Amino acid sequence: MAELINKLDNTKDKVIGKAKEAVGKASGSEETELKGKLQSRKADLKGKFDDSTEKIAKKINDMLDETEEHKTY
């Protein structure tokens, strides 16, 4: 569930960022354009981080499962 919420937040930030960027370009506001670009890039980075975290967690779980299978009691 948390993964879905993170993806929705990232998508929201990406869309809002792109909108701010477009408004900044249309109005000639460099500051608004920059804020939009930064918000969009932040969403991209958060998405990549979330993907990496999930892959790392899977590898650790797989290693722990494998260790558990080879354990003798």
Image: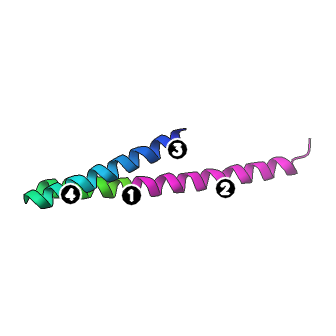
Q: Are marks 2 and 3 in contact (CB under 8 Å)?
A: no
Q: Quarter holding the N terminus?
A: top right
- Pinpoint residue 40: horizontal percent, then vertical percent: 31, 56
Residue at screen point 40% across, 44% down: 9
On the image, which quarter does residue 21 sit in? bottom left
At label 2, counting other C-alpha atoms closer than 10 Å, the crowd grade (few under 14, some 14-19, many 20 or more) is few
Comes first in the chain, label 3 or label 1: 3
Residue at screen point 14% across, 61% down: 25
At label 1, counting other C-alpha atoms closer than 10 Å, the crowd grade (few under 14, some 14-19, many 20 or more) is some
* Residue matched to label 1: 44
Local SS, label 4: helix
Q: Are marks 3 and 1 in contact (CB under 8 Å)?
A: no
User: Is residue 36 covered in magenta?
Assistant: no
Eye-nearest disc, 4 or 3? 4
Q: Main secondary structure of the magenta part?
A: helix
- CA–CA distance in space, label 4 to label 1: 15 Å
Range covered by the magenta-colored residues = 44-73
- CA–CA distance in space, label 4 to label 3: 27 Å
Q: Nearer the viewer, residue 44 or 25?
A: 25
- Pinpoint residue 49: horizontal percent, then vertical percent: 47, 54
Comes first in the chain, label 2 or label 1: 1
- CA–CA distance in space, label 3 to label 1: 15 Å
Name the amino acid type tagged 4.
Glu
Local SS, label 1: helix
* Residue matched to label 3: 3
Local SS, label 3: helix
Name the amino acid type tagged 3.
Glu
* Residue matched to label 4: 21
* Residue matched to label 2: 59
Residue reaching furthest right? 73
